[in-house]
Amino acid sequence: MNRSSLFNAIVIVMSIVFVACQSKVETTAPTASDALYSEKHRPQFHFSPKEKWMNDPNGMVYYKGIYHLFYQHYPDSTVWGPMHWGHAVSKDLVHWEHLPIAIYPDSLGMIFSGSAVVDKDNTSGLGTKENPPLVAIYTYHAMEKEKAGHNDYQTQGIAYSTDDGMTWKKYHGNPVLKNPGIKDFRDPKVFWHEQSKKWIMTLAVQDHMEFYGSPNLLTWSKLGEFGRDKGAHGGVWECPDLFELPVEGTDEKHWVLLVSINPGGPNGGSATQYFVGNFNGKTFEPMYNMNDTTWLDYGPDNYAGVTWSNAPDNRRIFLGWMSNWAYTQVTPTQRWRGATTVPRELSLQASGPNRYVISRPVRELVQHAEEKDTTNANRALSLIEGEIEAAKFDYVELSNAKGEKLRIGLDKKAKEFYVDRSEAGNVTFSKEFVTRAVCPRLSNDATIPYTIVTDVSSVEVFFDNGLSVMTATFFPEEPFTNVRIVGTVEPKEMSAGKTTYLKKIW
């Protein structure tokens, strides 16, 4: 089900309550004793909302030592509803503080996905040279117009902050980009393009991306488009991102375009594909003809991810929504629904004529280790690293005392990795909950380096130094505290590598 269908199904029975948020409020980070964060299946070191619904990460921007995370949020239910921008901040990408809702719906519509930038030269005039503004660019979705049969129900608006992102004021001239009469005209991702000296907006438009330019974030003109005949088209295109990445071990750099698609993912439902090529300030050109779609993450539970603007040290840090539209509204949680992946650092790797995006957990996560001997219960929170001979590898198994188990393995004949969650707990809540997901092995090396990140109800697997990646959620009766690696030769059980136990963040 795409978002437009979902909107009609849910919002018919809802009304939007318009609220103004004008004043700065103290943060409300939960404590370790907070019962909300002890709920069954609640992630313990992944970000999740304190209560109620979340989906896409939005407006991620780094400023004055703080990582800002906004996200699609409905504060009144654990199922999708009128969208707000929730808000949280972090100094280390691991520990998060909840802040008050940043942007509320208004008469122009709900607040859908978008991005945020540091307008350091005050091109918008919304701040000053001495105190430049943070500017958020987002989609307005006018549900009443959609229900009435209009096509121009999505427009782009902006809000700005002059107090380092703590409070936000909407621009009086919204929308800054009107709709030309096209359904699915949304999810603006904006960055400053130094070569052309303008702001560039990448916008998802049904089955392709369009590029717009602006000198000031207030007035926009169309520059070009990409993708009508490229990549996967099993569903609507959403949540773009466009940025440059270095090729590891070389002086090369190439542009990468992320495109989320729903449905049409490699293992059903939603997923994120990418293209590598060149951006000339107006349009994007892939660097080679791709016969197969390349996916950022082949697992079923990484969608709508984008990267932080203005990240320090030229890092390109990605964060995804750890769920899938095929079943997200019926997952067996109680007072919250939705979480993010761990933050991941992206780069490119060369393989013959091809360039692949590789992703690895940020180094800050590895630094978040348990200082003392961990309890058995906390062993579910772990980062497992090692290297194994491909010819000897069968699978990694996570399990608990209830006999539930999750297997992560290699099908040598098919040359595919897999995550099998068929016996990992509750799988009956949705027929769309795929129990076995596969991912091609792109490397031909004799050994397989691996990193496996496990939380109470999720696993993120990075094989071959992040070349083949899978993310999956699961819902066991109790956490998986046992791990073993099974091989194809005697002795069949092998060392599970180095295990770093992680601390709870709530």
Image (cartoon, grey):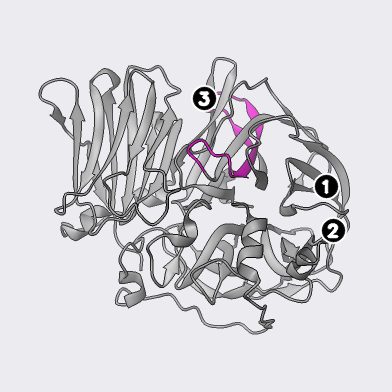
Q: Which residue is mark 3?
A: 249
Q: Nearer the viewer, mark 3 or mark 2?
A: 2
Is 488 placed above or below 168 here?
A: above
Where is residue 357, by image quadrant? top right
Which comes before the other along the chain, label 3 or label 2? 2
Residue 85 visible to an observer of this rendering: yes
Image-based side of 90 in relation to 480, left or right: right
Q: How far from the left and from the top, in percent, is residue 268?
A: 50, 41
Disc 3 on helix, strand or loop? loop
Assess disc 2: are there few (<14), some (14-19) or many (≥20) residues with their C-alpha within 10 Å of its C-alpha.
some
User: Is residue 182 found inside the magenta-colored segment of the image?
Assistant: no
Q: Which residue is mark 2?
A: 177
Q: How far from the left and from the top, in percent, is residue 388?
A: 26, 26
Residue shown at the point (45%, 51%) measured from the top left: 341
User: Is residue 259 found inside the magenta-colored segment of the image?
Assistant: yes
Contact? badges 1 and 2 (CB < 8 Å): yes
Residue shown at the point (40%, 58%) measured from the top left: 46
Where is residue 196, by image quadrant? top right
Which comes before the other along the chain, label 1 or label 3? 1
Disc 1 on helix, strand or loop? strand
Instruction: Look at the image and tell me in which quarter the C terminus lies.
Output: bottom left
Disc 2 on helix, strand or loop? loop
The disc labelled 2 sits on which kind of residue?
Leu
Image-based side of 403 in relation to 39, left or right: left
* Measured Cα–Cα span from mark 1 to mark 2: 10 Å
Q: How far from the left and from the top, in percent, is residue 39?
A: 32, 70
Please identify the residue farthest to the left as the structure is shown.
491
Assess disc 3: are there few (<14), some (14-19) or many (≥20) residues with their C-alpha within 10 Å of its C-alpha.
few
The disc labelled 3 sits on which kind of residue?
Gly
